[in-house]
Image (cartoon, rainbow, N blue to C red):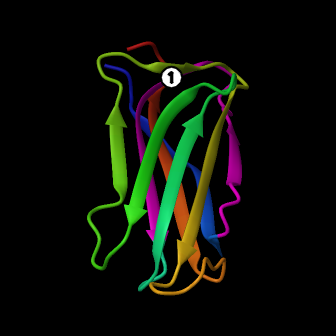
Amino acid sequence: MPQLLSTRIGDIYPTPSDGQPAERMWTNPHGVPIYLRQTALWLGLDKGAVADMWAQIRGSQNELVDEINWDHYQEPSLPHTITRSFAPDYFLVPAGGTLKFVAAATAWIPGGPLTPKVAFAGNATIWYTLQKP
């Protein structure tokens, strides 16, 4: 059984919820292809705000690997994390290939106008092997 490895491929720290995507790029550092087995996406928002939020992981050819869409309209909200398993399959990231984590939010205070002053955050984690499963 191949060893399962993990890494955080992107962190988006508190950033304005102005609808503009924030991006983080991760490059496969291993010198060999990796076999992506699982992903996790997490989103967070300032308490008391409402927002439409989304996040994606995209491959080297801009192909969609994982995605979450979250309408945050009340406190407390339901879990805003998605974990996706590709088992028994995998997503291949070539040696030197990239994964892009991109996320955005459009937020407002209830009863008020859209405001980028509300902050959101997010992160993406992957689990993978260096040998074909």
Give the residues in magenta.
18-44
Prevailing secondary structure class for the magenta stretch in the rendered image: strand
Q: In this view, does 65 lie above or below 74?
A: above
Q: Residue at x 60, y 18 (%)?
A: 33
User: Can you give x and y, in whole percent of width and height, for residue 98 in the image?
Assistant: 69, 32
Q: Which residue is drawn at 62% across and 28% down?
A: 59
Q: Which residue is drawn at 61% across and 46% down?
A: 101
In the image, is residue 39 part of the stretch drawn in magenta?
yes
**Crowd class of label 1 (few under 14; some 14 to 19; many from 20; radius 10 Å):** some
In the rendered view, does 86 fall on the left or right side of 27? left
Q: Which residue is drawn at 29% across and 17% down?
A: 88
In the image, is residue 50 part of the stretch drawn in magenta?
no
Quadrant location of the C terminus in the rendered image: top left
In the rendered view, does 54 fall on the left or right side of 83? right
User: Can you give x and y, in whole percent of width and height, for residue 70 in the image?
Assistant: 41, 56
Amino acid type at image mark 1: Leu
Name the residue beneath numbered marker 1: 130
Q: In which quarter of the image is residue 114?
A: bottom right
